[in-house]
Image (tube, rainbow, N blue to C red):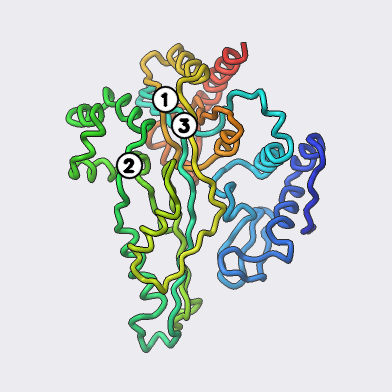
Amino acid sequence: MKTVYELPQDLLAAIRYFSDPDNCLSFMIGLRWPDGLTCPRCGSKAANFIKTRRLWICKDCKKNFTVKVGTIMEDSPMGLDKWLITIWMIANKSDLFKDAEFLITEGGDNLLDGSAVRYVGVDVAEKAPFWLQLTATGQPGHGSRPISDSATNRLVRAMSRVINWETPIKLLPAVEKFFKDVAPLQSEPMRTKFANIRASLQDQAFVKELTAEREYNFLLRNTISLTMLSGSKQTNVIPNSATCNLDVRLLPDENREDFLAALKGVIADPTIKVENVNTFKPPNSSRVDTELFKVISDVTKANHPEAIVTTKMLSGYTESQLYRQLGITAYGWVPFYTTPEENEGVHGNNERISVKNIREGTKEFFEVVTQISR
């Protein structure tokens, strides 16, 4: 497999080049690992490539990885072809976007209750991935003779403090609008509490109840998920190092250095090394007082008179962050309407949408694009 990337020199060449999945893979390999492929988990240079899945399995740590790991693309289901063409165009042909006003991309959060669409959430902002790796080191030994301050023990103690840390509540304007907009859909006492969300968040009992719900918790705070753990390769060996990875998502306008300082205070162990392992891009947002937002609202109301159109903040990450830097208003909106149960299948084995969604959603999308283009 070729591992030296070639940068296309013009737009047509870029489209042709990055339309080939093998070219995309070769490009990313050469760009990320010019001195030879390296496992981003443990640093090993020994890995087997699984061609059918387009990923590697490290021979040492046994973890799998793709060329997206640790990049802004890792969190997106969008293929390398679209990402690389987008990045190439922004980096080399940003003048092509000088007259572009709007971008519609993946995202949005719509609620279907029976046959009625309760609300349509248009993503106007998104959180920023700030992925961290924590490494503890210590004296190695045999598992039959425990070491109280071993690397694994200290890392587990630190992780216990981290996962029990309740980061501060912060109410952003777009999130406040969302709660107020959907208040009529709630039963009492939540209806009143949502309608007065800023005051309600002063009640710690309410905060605990609200943030226990996954769909609301991420809207109100920086979040931390423990996603990876690594220690010894053998049960009877106490390793000299142990690592874990944290998927941290920061709210717009958050300062990553301030967050990192607070996290280290929670870890409370200065010997544990904390490293940022992805390319951090500060989050941004788009205004809602635009022609496109109005058109989306009008088309939605025409097709679903009962629906509330509101703003949402995406917990994931899209290319909107890149286009907003060019002055383009970017929204995450997809006119597919799913139940909470169907939403639980996103990125899972049962991810799916109905044929009705494809047919009717395509029609609504066409209506929005047609009206905004007049």
The picture places residue 373, in percent across and down from the top left corner, at 62, 14
Closer to us: mark 1 or mark 3? 3
Q: Is residue 302 above or below residue 232?
A: above
Q: Say which residue appears at 49% left-offset and 14% top-offset.
A: 299
- Real-space CA distance between mark 3 and mark 2, rounded to the nearest whole angstrom: 18 Å
Task: Name which quarter of the figure residue 269 lies in.
Answer: bottom left
For residue 354, say whether it is visible. no
The picture places residue 151, in percent across and down from the top left corner, at 41, 77
Secondary structure beneath label 3:
strand
The reply, left or right, for residue 292 in relation to residue 259 is: right
Pointer 3: what residue? 123
Task: Name which quarter of the figure residue 261 lies in.
Answer: bottom left
Q: Upstream in the sequence, badge 3 or badge 2? A: 3
Whether pointer 1 and pointer 2 mark residues with C-beta atoms closer than 8 Å, the reply is no
The picture places residue 247, in percent across and down from the top left corner, at 45, 54
Pointer 1: what residue? 120
